[in-house]
Image (cartoon, rainbow, N blue to C red):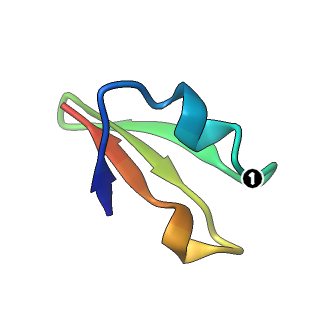
């Protein structure tokens, strides 16, 4: 999982990416391609 300053680039890499907020952190998750995970904060 990558920690990024901006998740906009991580979200647009794949059309199945979703933004999720958990415990004050913002995550990009992808069920079809789990390598696309990223986190902010």
Identity of the residue drawn at 62% across and 44% down: 18
Q: Position of residue 10 (x, y in %)?
A: 55, 42
Residue that numbered label 1 is attached to: 14
* Secondary structure of residue under mark 1: loop
Q: Which one is nearer the viewer's eye here, 27 or 6?
A: 6
Q: Residue at x 51, y 73 (%)?
A: 35
Horizontal and vertical percent position of residue 32 = 71, 74
Residue at (70, 38) in percent of width and height: 12
Location of the C terminus (image quadrant):
top left
Q: Quadrant of residue 16?
A: bottom right
Q: In this view, does 3 lie to the left or right of 20?
A: left
Q: Against 35, is 21 above or below?
A: above
Is 16 situated left or right of 24 in this image? right
Residue at image location 19% in from the left, 28% down from the top: 24
Badge 1: few (under 14), some or many (20 or more) residues near its Cα, within 10 Å?
few
Identify whether 4 is placed above or below 17. above
Depth check, front residue: 28 or 12: 12
User: Can you tell which quarter of the image residue 4 is in?
Assistant: top left
Q: Where is residue 14 in the image (x, y as percent from the top left)?
A: 75, 52
């Amino acid at each position: 999982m990558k920690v990024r300053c901006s998740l906009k680039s991580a979200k647009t890499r794949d059309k199945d990416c979703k933004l999720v907020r958990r415990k004050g952190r913002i995550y990009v998750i992808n069920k079809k391609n789990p390598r696309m995970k990223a986190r902010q904060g």
